[in-house]
Amino acid sequence: MPQWVAGLPAVNASLNGLATILLLVGFVLIKRRKVVPHAWAMGSAFATSVIFLVCYLVYHFALHHYTGKSGKHFEGQGIIRPIYFTILISHVLLAIPVAVMALMTLLRAWRRNWEAHRRLARITFPIWVYVSVTGVIIYGLLYHWPQG
């Protein structure tokens, strides 16, 4: 497998971490009523998440192409195993709707439908942060957690 493929999980974790930081910065900015910087932070978080999704898909297609495997299997044993799978399942189940919700939230802001934007953002934001943070945790558990 080429090095560029092997390096993509770290890139993906970094993109998830960056998205988390941008989301939290955007949250602080809107609480301080800094609307324009908030919009830039949230737009950047969305762009970062889109780039993550592209890299994630490229990784899995390339992994399958070069190895015939669809993903890396978790090798941890003991109590960490059910913890890992609980995090993974919740991450995957929430990642699907949050992608649509984030886009809808941004479109409502773009259209200046502020009340609808705020209502949806209150739901979208914590889920999006959770998905971004758990993406980094999953990477750590899958690639760096001591096995055995």
Image (tube, grey):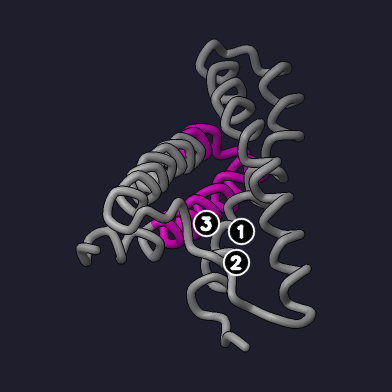
The one nearer the camera, 88 or 41, is: 88
The residues tagged by marks 3 and 1 sit, at their Cα atoms, a distance apart of 10 Å
Camera-near label (2 vs 3) is: 2
Q: Residue drawn 30% across and 65% down?
A: 7
Q: Position of residue 50 (x, y in %)?
A: 42, 37
Q: Are discs 2 and 3 less than 8 Å apart at CB? A: no
Q: Position of residue 141 (x, y in %)?
A: 58, 73
Work out which quarter of the rendered image holds the N terminus and state it. Answer: bottom left
Q: Which residue is mark 1?
A: 133
For the residue marked with disc 2, what is the amino acid?
Ile
Q: Are discs 1 and 2 less than 8 Å apart at CB? A: yes
Q: Position of residue 25 (x, y in %)?
A: 55, 52
Horizontal side of 87 relative to 30 (left or right) equals: right
Q: Residue drawn 40% across and 61% down?
A: 9
The residues tagged by marks 2 and 3 sit, at their Cα atoms, a distance apart of 15 Å
- Marked residue nearer the N-terminal end (2 or 3): 3
Camera-near label (1 vs 2) is: 2
- Marked residue nearer the N-terminal end (3 or 1): 3
Task: Tell whether position 25 is magenta.
Answer: yes
- Dominant SS of magenta comes to helix
Residue 40 visible in the shown view:
no
Camera-near label (3 vs 1) is: 1
Residue 83 visible in the shown view:
yes
For the residue marked with disc 3, what is the amino acid?
Ile
Q: Which residue is mark 3?
A: 21
The magenta segment is 12-40
For the residue marked with disc 1, what is the amino acid?
Val
